[in-house]
Every structure is written in structure tokens, then in C-alpha cells.
């Protein structure tokens, strides 16, 4: 199973998109996709659904959503698969788990590229840092979980992802400026701005504008670059 949440959520099994049939099942799938291979408590899922349905109906709606998602997963798996809908979207004590089966997850790729970029910055390798941090940014196709009317838990999860994206952007800009690539940076920032970068008025778009202003004022690359402490990725925080 492949999962993308750094933009509009997309979940595929065997290359077949898992298309949730109702807004409620789409919401449940988005929450599970935001924490793949980890148990999401029923209480979290029910609280999220309470933004769509009366709270007293949330758990019943959750069970219906899970059943409908398993039906779609069964269609994608096909008759010859060793995986079953009940193992892909499994019931666990107190919650549900979406099992990727070792498939691709864009958040994990983002964490891997960002971590490599931070380590390169730490050892003063600006070229490697710029390359790896840009790869991390390129994994984003829009705002995290775009199109989902998030409840309180999912809003916090989105905020964590957004904060990590801002940190990576800031370190990537520093690496590019350290290399003296002001013109290239301006072009790259324009590309990021035009690629569905964020929600109107959000912090990421503001950070892009500030970075563009810095890139418009070229300065000699410092010979002894002193870097601030590198931020730790928060993406791995659980529900």
C-alpha cells in the first residue's frame, strides 16, 4: 500500500486508488493514512467524525465507514492477494490500524530526506544539504491532507507536518544562500510558490515571500558559516 498525505490524501493498493465512497469514510481513511502502521484509537476517530455527525452517532458512523473502506480495499486487492481487507485495515484493541505492508509513504520519505539534509548541514556540506532538503520539499504537492475538513486531532497532526515543512524550507534557503546561488534560489522559490504551496495566508507562503526577499539581496557566501541548532523533525509523534 502506498500513502500520500503531503497534499491531497491518496491511498493505493496494488496501484489501485482506494476511493472512499462517503465523506465520513474519506475522513476516516485520511486519519489512518496520517498515521500508517500505528493504531489510531477509536476515541480519536469518533471525535474527528463528530465534526460531521452528531457525537452520539459518531461510533456507529465509524463502524460503517470502516466496513465500506474494507469493501473498497477488497476490490483493490483482488482474489489472488495474500492480504485481506481485515489485515490491511485491521481492528486492534482500542482502535484501528492501516497496514502499508512495507509500501511507500511520503511522510517517511520526507523525514528521511530532511534528516539527511540536516546532518549534511551539521557537517558543513551545504551542497548535499541543499539537494536533500529540496528533495524533501518536492514531496509536497499542496497543503497537508488538503481537502479534508479536519477535526481537533487531525488539525494538530497537520500543524506538526506544516511545522516540519517550515523548518526544512528555512534550512534549505540557508544552504542555497551559503552556496551563493541567489538567482537559482529565486527561480526555485517561484516554482514552489506556483506548485500549490499552501493555503492562502498561511505561514508557509509567508516564509516563501521572506525567502524571496532575502534572495533578492545577494551577498558573498561566508567562509566560516555558523549555523543555528538544527530542528528535530516532529513528524514521528503518535496519536
Image (cartoon, helix red, strand yellow):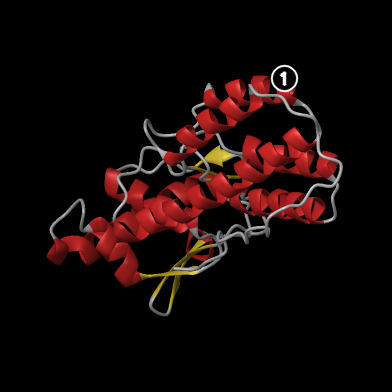
Residue at 33 percent of width and 67 percent of height: 44
Vertical placement of 13 versus 70: above or below?
above
Q: Element at badge 1?
A: helix
Residue at 65 percent of width and 24 percent of height: 217
Camera-side residue of 162 and 44: 162
Question: Left of 121 or right of it: where is 74?
Answer: left
Residue beneath disc 1: 183
Question: Left of 192 or right of it: where is 93?
Answer: left
Question: Left of 205 or right of it: where is 174?
Answer: right
Where residue 191 sits: x, y (%)?
A: 60, 22
Vertical placement of 157 versus 95: above or below?
above
Residue at 43 percent of width and 44 percent of height: 145
Crowd rating for badge 1 (residues with CA inside 10 Å; few <14, some 14–19, many 20+):
some
Residue at 80 percent of width and 30 percent of height: 220
Where residue 54 sits: x, y (%)?
A: 13, 58
Camera-side residue of 114 and 153: 114
Tally the marks: 1
Question: Left of 78 or right of it: where is 96?
Answer: left
Asked whether the viewer can see residue 78, the reply is no
Where residue 97 sits: x, y (%)?
A: 48, 66
User: What is the quadrant of the C terminus in the image?
Assistant: bottom left
Camera-side residue of 147 and 152: 152
Asked whether the viewer can see residue 136, the reply is yes
Where residue 26 sits: x, y (%)?
A: 36, 46
Amino acid at each position: 500500500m502506498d500513502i500520500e498525505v503531503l497534499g491531497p490524501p491518496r491511498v493505493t493498493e496494488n496501484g489501485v486508488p482506494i476511493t472512499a465512497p462517503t465523506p465520513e469514510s474519506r475522513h476516516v481513511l485520511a486519519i489512518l493514512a496520517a498515521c500508517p502502521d500505528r493504531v489510531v484509537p477509536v476515541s480519536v476517530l469518533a471525535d474527528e467524525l463528530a465534526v460531521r455527525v452528531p457525537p452520539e452517532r459518531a461510533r456507529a458512523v465509524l463502524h460503517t465507514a470502516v466496513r465500506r473502506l474494507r469493501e473498497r480495499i477488497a476490490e483493490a486487492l483482488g482474489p489472488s492477494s495474500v492480504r485481506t481487507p481485515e489485515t490491511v485495515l485491521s481492528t486492534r484493541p482500542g482502535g484501528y490500524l492501516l497496514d502499508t505492508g512495507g509500501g511507500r509513504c511520503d511522510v517517511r520519505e520526507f523525514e528521511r530526506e530532511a534528516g539527511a539534509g540536516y546532518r549534511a548541514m551539521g557537517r558543513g556540506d551545504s551542497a548535499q544539504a541543499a539537494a536533500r532538503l529540496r528533495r524533501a520539499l518536492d514531496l509536497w504537492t499542496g497543503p497537508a491532507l488538503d481537502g479534508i475538513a479536519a477535526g481537533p486531532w487531525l488539525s494538530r497532526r497537520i500543524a506538526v507536518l506544516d511545522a516540519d515543512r517550515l523548518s526544512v524550507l528555512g534550512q534549505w534557503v540557508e544552504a542555497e544562500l551559503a552556496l551563493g546561488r541567489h538567482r537559482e534560489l529565486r527561480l526555485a522559490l517561484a516554482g514552489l510558490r506556483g506548485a500549490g504551496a499552501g493555503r492562502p495566508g498561511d505561514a508557509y507562503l509567508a516564509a516563501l515571500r521572506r525567502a524571496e526577499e532575502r534572495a533578492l539581496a545577494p551577498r558573498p557566501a561566508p567562509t566560516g558559516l555558523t549555523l543555528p541548532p538544527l530542528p528535530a523533525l516532529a513528524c514521528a509523534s503518535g496519536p
